[in-house]
Amino acid sequence: KKFTPNYVEKCWDDFTDDDYKELANCGYHIGDYVKVVAGADTGFESVSSLKVNDNLEGIKQKIDELFSSEEYGNIFRIKGFVIDQGGSYQVNATRNATMVDSISIGQSTAIVIGTNLNKAKILEVLER
C-alpha cells in the first residue's frame, strides 16, 4: 500500500477497514485537469457523425472501406455505437482488429480518429 499526501496506490481487493477509515478522514483539494482533445497540438484529428444508421454488419463494412483507402486520410481508429435488432453495441476498430461489445443503451454514432482526414469523404461513407 502506498499513501502519499496526494494519492493512494493499492489494489481495490486489498483495501482494509483501516484503509477506508484513513480515506474517510483525509482531506481533499480541488485541482484542474485539462484533457487534450484530438487535434489540439497532437497532430490528430477526428471526424464524428450522429447520422449513422447501420446495423452491425453495415458499420463493419463501412469500417473496412474507410481503412482500405488512403483517400480518407491516415485513419488510426474508428469507434462508435450502433443499434441492431433492439440491442446496442459499442464498436472499436483499428486497422488490425474490430471489437464489438454489447452495452445497455446507446445512440448510433461514429468517430474516426487519424491524421490528414478527408472529412467530406468520411462523412459520405458514414452517413449513406
Image (cartoon, helix red, strand yellow):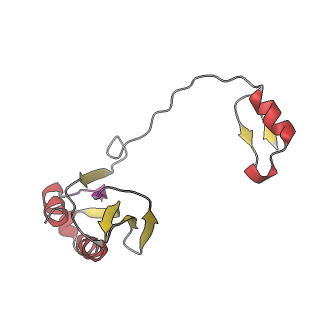
Predominant SS along the magenta part: strand
Label tally: 0
Rendered position, 73 above or below 19: below
Residue 113: in magenta span: yes
* Residue interval drawn in magenta: 109-117
Q: Residue at x 70, y 35 (%)?
A: 7
Q: Which of 25 and 84 is in front in this view?
A: 84
Q: In which quarter of the image is the C terminus?
A: bottom left
Q: Which residue is drawn at 28% across and 59% down?
A: 108
- Give coordinates of residue 109: x percent, y percent: 28, 57
Q: Is residue 31 left or right of residue 114?
A: right
Rendered position, 51 above or below 87: above
| Quadrant in the rendering for residue 63 | bottom left
Q: Residue at x 74, y 49 (%)?
A: 12
- Give coordinates of residue 107: x percent, y percent: 31, 55
Question: Visible in this render: residue 11?
Answer: no
| Quadrant in the rendering for residue 56 | bottom left
- Give coordinates of residue 99: x percent, y percent: 43, 71
